[in-house]
């Protein structure tokens, strides 16, 4: 029952459901079996082969959402990302990597690529020119992540795809922050899209998972390595993820509606120095966002003015939780300087625009007024 012609909320709700032929229940049955018949069957099923019934069917929902031919579900976003990168990068190959990427991905590249003999360059900035400047004769892969964390900068997806195609370079995009509700990189010419399903796909801060979607040909190659790395997700969690994804569309739309209102509110606030959100008309990426995204997402960040203490502000919040992770239905905030970017030197951090006053805001589905009230009372208490 998966069709790209269906509306996005219908795909979220119904695509890739397993029919309960025995009892006619209305939700997908959960098949926990790790042992399946091998005689006279077309598919040899085994969890680590990513092809148990629940894995196979939920993959169809993810593929439909990303306008892909096929998808695989992993035990974490990093399992999805590392399996994908190592499928297409061999000893002697070179990768061009966007500068602002998720810390875990950056750490994977910097800590382990040299062990595999893989070369890499991080771009100077997010312009297509700076990607082009990094290309070498042995470049086989370009990696992007847009919007970026935590400053919500955008990469011109179409320009990167075009650049890569002209040189026969494969492209991979981390679409975690946008979600397929807001952005479909494959439609813009990117080859592979990856997700930390721990974030919006799960959406309730209680599932660790990852996903990759692409053409069948590319997914077959990734599968070949992934089944040996063994990063599959247990079927019970696959089943929970299906349940979460039924509301992906309505959650993300509600969250981004809140994010836009809060970005506007913060922009006018006299305690706030700057707001980073592509949905604001004043944002340098606003026009690009309107071209390549179907909305502006639900992540934003903002800087408090110097006479407010960011630590005190975070501690004073009552409704909004300080949290490492993001994308749940509950609003959370984080200080990148103390969390995601704490391992960088102060100089490196500041050169990336990550000051101690910067706060990343993952906007949830709460009532807007309650979020504003919470921010206001915390701002008042943090005035120094
Ligand atoms: C969280 C995250 C990841 C890693 O996902 P895990 O599920 O934690 O392994 C990758 N990319 C982005 C953008 C993320 O936010």
Image (tube, rainbow, N blue to C red):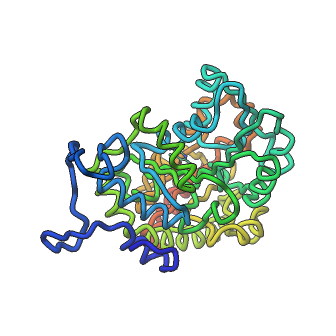
Vertical comparison of 304 with 346: above or below: below
**x then y, percent, for residue 75:** 39, 43
Tell me: 162 left or right of 231: right
Quarter of the rendering containing residue 346: top right
Q: Which residue is at the front of the view, 212 or 36?
A: 36
- Identified at 45% across, 54% down, the residue is 317
Quadrant of the frame with the N terminus: bottom left
**x then y, percent, for residue 300:** 61, 59
- Identified at 33% across, 50% down, the residue is 43
- Identified at 47% across, 47% down, the residue is 325
- Identified at 46% across, 64% down, the residue is 364
Q: Which residue is at the front of the view, 331 or 180?
A: 180
**x then y, percent, for residue 107:** 59, 31
In the rendered image, the residue lying farthest to the left is 23
**x then y, percent, for residue 335:** 56, 44
Q: How many marks?
A: 0
Tell me: 379 left or right of 96: left
Vertical comparison of 309 with 6: above or below: above
């Amino acid at each position: 029952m998966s069709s790209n012609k269906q509306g996005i909320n219908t795909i979220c709700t119904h695509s890739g459901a397993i029919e309960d032929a025995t009892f006619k229940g209305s939700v997908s049955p959960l098949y926990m079996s790790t042992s399946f018949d091998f005689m006279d069957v077309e598919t040899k099923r085994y969890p680590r082969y990513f092809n148990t019934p629940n894995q196979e069917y939920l993959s169809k929902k993810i593929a439909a959402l990303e306008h892909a031919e096929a998808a695989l579900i992993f035990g974490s976003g990093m399992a999805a990302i590392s399996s994908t990168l190592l499928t297409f990068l061999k000893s002697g190959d070179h990768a061009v990597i966007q500068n602002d990427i998720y810390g875990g991905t950056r750490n994977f590249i910097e800590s382990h690529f040299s062990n595999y003999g893989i070369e890499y360059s991080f771009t100077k900035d997010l312009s297509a020119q700076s990607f082009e400047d990094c290309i070498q004769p042995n470049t086989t892969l370009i990696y992007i992540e847009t919007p970026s964390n935590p400053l919500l900068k955008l990469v011109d997806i179409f320009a990167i795809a075009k650049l890569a195609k002209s040189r026969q370079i494969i492209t991979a995009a981390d679409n975690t922050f946008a979600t397929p509700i807001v952005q479909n990189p494959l439609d813009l010419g990117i080859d592979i899209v990856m997700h930390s399903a721990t974030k919006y796909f799960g959406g309730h801060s209680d599932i660790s998972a990852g996903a990759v979607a692409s053409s069948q040909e590319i997914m077959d190659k990734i599968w070949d390595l992934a089944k040996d790395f063994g990063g599959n997700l247990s079927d019970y969690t696959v089943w929970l993820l299906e349940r979460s994804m039924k509301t992906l569309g309505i959650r993300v739309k509600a969250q981004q509606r809140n994010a836009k209102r809060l970005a506007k509110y913060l922009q006018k606030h006299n305690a706030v120095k700057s707001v980073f959100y592509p949905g604001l008309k004043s944002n340098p990426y606003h026009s690009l966002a309107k071209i390549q995204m179907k909305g502006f997402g639900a992540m934003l960040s903002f800087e408090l003015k110097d006479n407010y203490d960011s630590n005190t502000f975070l501690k004073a919040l009552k409704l909004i939780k300080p949290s490492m992770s993001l994308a749940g239905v509950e609003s959370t905030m984080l200080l990148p300087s103390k969390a995601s970017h704490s391992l960088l030197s102060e100089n490196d951090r500041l050169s990336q625009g990550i000051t101690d006053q910067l706060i990343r805001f993952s906007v949830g589905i709460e009532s807007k007024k309650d979020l504003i009230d919470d921010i206001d009372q915390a701002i008042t208490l943090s005035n120094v």
